Amino acid sequence: MSTMYTATFTFAKGVFDEKFHALDAEIAQLAKSIPGYLGEEAWENP
């Protein structure tokens, strides 16, 4: 039996500072290091 995890982050559209982008990159890097990582997707509601 395998286990699957998912995480969803929702943000209001706006201007993000350098701290936000640094944290976002750190989260992505950690996620990619997890065995079985399948990728990430982005979606924007116009």
Image (tube, rainbow, N blue to C red):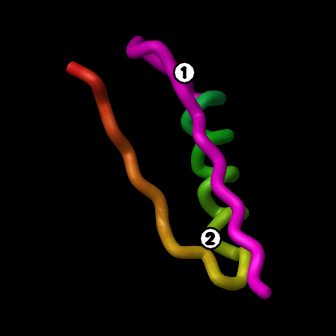
Q: Which residues are magenta?
A: 1-18
User: Callout 2: 10 Å neighbours few (<14), some, many (20+)?
Assistant: some
Task: State the residue position of label 2.
Answer: 32
Task: Classify residue 28 as left or right of residue 3.
Answer: left
Task: Classify residue 31 as left or right of residue 17.
Answer: right
Q: CA distance from mark 1 to mark 2?
A: 23 Å
Image vertical order of residue 4 relative to residue 16, above or below: below
> Could you say which is closer to the camera, residue 12 or residue 26?
12
Task: State the residue position of label 1.
Answer: 17
In the image, what residue occupies the spot 69% across and 69% down? 4
Q: Dot 1: what SS?
A: loop
Residue 16 in the magenta stretch? The answer is yes
In the image, what residue occupies the spot 73% across and 75% down? 34
Q: Dot 2: what SS?
A: helix
Mark closer to the observer (1, 2):
2
Q: Quadrant of residue 8?
A: top right
> Could you say which is closer to the camera, residue 21 or residue 2?
2
Q: Residue 36 appears at what percent x and percent y?
A: 64, 82
Q: Residue 20 appears at what percent x and percent y?
A: 61, 29
Q: Residue furthest front?
A: 1
Q: Residue 32 appears at what percent x and percent y?
A: 62, 70
Image vertical order of residue 20 relative to residue 33, above or below: above
At label 1, the amino acid type is Asp
Image vertical order of residue 26 relative to residue 22, above or below: below
Q: Quadrant of residue 21?
A: top right
In the image, what residue occupies the spot 67% across and 63% down? 31
